[in-house]
Image (cartoon, rainbow, N blue to C red):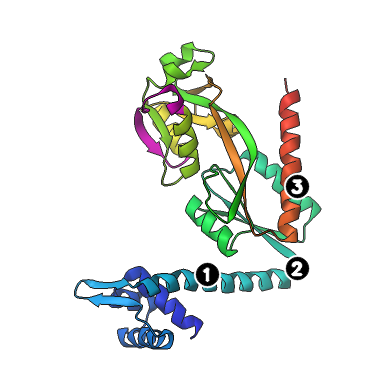
């Protein structure tokens, strides 16, 4: 079995059509069919159910697809690690970010890290939560930041930042009459919420606190980013939300912000790590993250 064979198999498993898969691979269909046949003979089991309407994976094919992707990801990571060493780096820390958990204060942490360990390469990936969890389990990522602690087996979630939520409203909106917006008033208005397909953890936390008042929120639109939310709010579609920490980057001339008067109106950022342990580089990063979070908390407490 060669890596080339696994690449061919993965493409066919994604396309479930020999013609389209061959086109993606820039080869003829017959070599692709031969590779898949050789794989099936070597493994002793069919990998695809073939029919008039196309192909579909067998149970064995599903297992191989997961393992093949992991093997190729490990090979690619090996290549990147070797290139990093050749370029003068002494190590790599791979950080996954999900749910829009990137915040201005993360810049300060990375700047400190670069100053103290310039030989360390930092790779950050903005990925869906499901991809982060899969990457942490298979070793593709070292640590992650997300807005969800619903992570399943094999992952440890630790609250690292907790921020008050602010309501973002259009100018001249009736909620601006409140210095702090009561939750029972807030839920009477249409809302622009995080797109659960893009920012799953954000959506879960906001929906949870809104339901504390009872009933279902009135959802006008879903937004995949803060910028998109600001556009919808400024256009009058509904009320949006940002955290106190995100307020620094939320700039739009046609919106205003108000604190939400509810103890449930908080957003928690979680540090996610493999339960099986972490590398020395990841350990040092986590220690720095804890120190940075503690300093941020102290600075917030003493600010006027």
- Disc 1 is placed on an element classified as helix
| Residue 254 in sight from this viewpoint | no
Say whether disc 3 or disc 1 marks the residue closer to the N-terminus: 1
Residue 259, percent from left and from top: 55, 21
Q: CA distance from mark 3 to mark 2?
A: 23 Å
Q: Which residue is mark 3?
A: 288
Q: Which residue is mark 1?
A: 70
Q: Total label count?
A: 3
Q: Which residue is mark 2?
A: 88
Q: What span is colored magenta in the figure? A: 210-225
102 and 1: which one is in front?
A: 1
Residue drawn at x 32%, y 76% is 48
Residue 265, percent from left and from top: 53, 26
- Vertical order, 59 against 3 (above or below): above
- Vertical order, 58 against 136 (above or below): below
Q: CA distance from mark 2 to mark 1?
A: 27 Å
- Disc 2 is placed on an element classified as loop
Q: CA distance from mark 3 to mark 1?
A: 29 Å
Is residue 257 shown in magenta?
Answer: no
């Amino acid at each position: 079995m060669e890596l080339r064979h696994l690449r061919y198999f993965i493409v066919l498993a994604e396309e479930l059509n020999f013609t389209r898969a061959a086109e993606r691979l820039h080869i003829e269909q017959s070599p692709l069919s031969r590779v898949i046949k050789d794989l099936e003979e070597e493994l002793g089991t069919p990998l695809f159910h073939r029919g008039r309407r196309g192909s579909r994976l067998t149970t064995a094919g599903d297992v191989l697809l997961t393992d093949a992707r992991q093997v190729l990801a490990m090979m690619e990571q090996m290549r990147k690690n070797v290139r990093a060493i050749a370029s003068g780096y002494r190590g790599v820390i791979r950080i996954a970010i999900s749910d829009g958990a990137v915040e201005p204060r993360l810049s300060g942490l990375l700047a400190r890290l670069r100053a103290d360990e310039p030989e360390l390469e930092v790779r950050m990936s903005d990925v869906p939560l499901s991809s982060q969890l899969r990457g942490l389990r298979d070793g593709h990522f070292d640590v992650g930041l997300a807005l969800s602690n619903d992570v399943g087996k094999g992952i440890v979630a630790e609250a690292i930042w907790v921020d008050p939520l602010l309501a973002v409203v259009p100018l001249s909106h009736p909620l601006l009459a409140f210095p702090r917006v009561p939750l029972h008033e807030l839920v009477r208005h249409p809302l622009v919420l995080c797109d659960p397909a893009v920012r799953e953890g954000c959506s879960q936390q906001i929906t949870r606190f809104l339901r504390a008042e009872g009933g279902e929120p009135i959802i006008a639109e879903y937004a995949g980013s803060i910028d998109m939310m600001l556009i919808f709010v400024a256009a009058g579609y509904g009320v949006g939300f940002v955290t106190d920490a995100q307020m620094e980057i939320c700039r739009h001339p046609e919106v205003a912000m108000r604190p939400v008067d509810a103890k449930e109106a908080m957003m928690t950022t979680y540090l996610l790590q493999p339960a099986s342990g972490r590398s020395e580089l990841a350990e040092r990063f986590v220690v720095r993250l804890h120190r940075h979070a503690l300093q941020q908390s102290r600075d917030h407490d003493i600010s006027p």
